[in-house]
Image: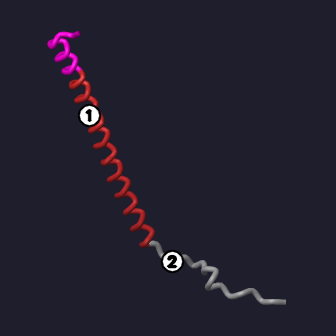
Amino acid sequence: MQGVQEQIEELQMKLAFQELTVEELNQEVIKLNQLIANQQHQIQLLIGKLKAMEPSNIATQAEETPPPHY
């Protein structure tokens, strides 16, 4: 059996590794949240531009007059 001191040291190393992993994952989550916020802002800008566009001069198919029949 391992001594108590060796077990404590092993647990401390595992804890340090887990803390590092959690911090790295946290940084990735922060980056992804910023990316999502940026993309949401860009989508809102595009929606605004689409709403501001003038309607097309091309009639929809429902508005078209039917072709003459021969």
Query: Which residue lies at the image location 39% right of the left edge and 68% below the top edge?
Result: 48
Is 27 on the left-hand or right-hand side of 42?
A: left
Element carrying mark 2: loop
Is residue 8 in the magenta section?
A: yes
Identify the residue position indicated by label 1 in the image: 22
Q: Amino acid at mark 2?
A: Pro
Query: Which residue lies at the image location 46% right of the left edge and 72% below the top edge?
Result: 53
Mark number displayed over residue 63: none
Residue positioned most to the left: 5
Residue 36, given in percent of the width and then of the height, sits at: 35, 51
Q: Badge 2: how crowded within 10 Å, few (<14), some, or many (20+)?
A: few
Quadrant location, the C terminus: bottom right
Is residue 7 in the magenta section?
A: yes
Q: Badge 1: how crowded within 10 Å, few (<14), some, or many (20+)?
A: few
Residue 13, given in percent of the width and then of the height, sits at: 22, 20
Query: Which residue lies at the image location 42% right of the left edge and 67% below the top edge?
Result: 49
Quadrant location, the N terminus: top left
What is the magenta range?
Answer: 1-13
In this view of the protein, which residue sits in the foreground, 31 or 69? Answer: 31
Q: Quick one: label 1 or label 2, which is nearer the N terminus?
A: 1
Query: Which residue lies at the image location 75% right of the left edge and 86% below the top edge?
Result: 67
Tag 1 and tag 2, C-beta contact below 8 Å: no
Identify the residue position indicated by label 2 in the image: 55
C-alpha separation, residue under disc 1 versus residue under disc 2: 51 Å
Question: Which image quadrant for residue 16?
Answer: top left
In this view of the protein, which residue sits in the foreground, 15 or 1? Answer: 1
Q: Main secondary structure of the magenta part?
A: helix
Residue positioned most to the front: 1
Is 23 on the left-hand or right-hand side of 51?
A: left
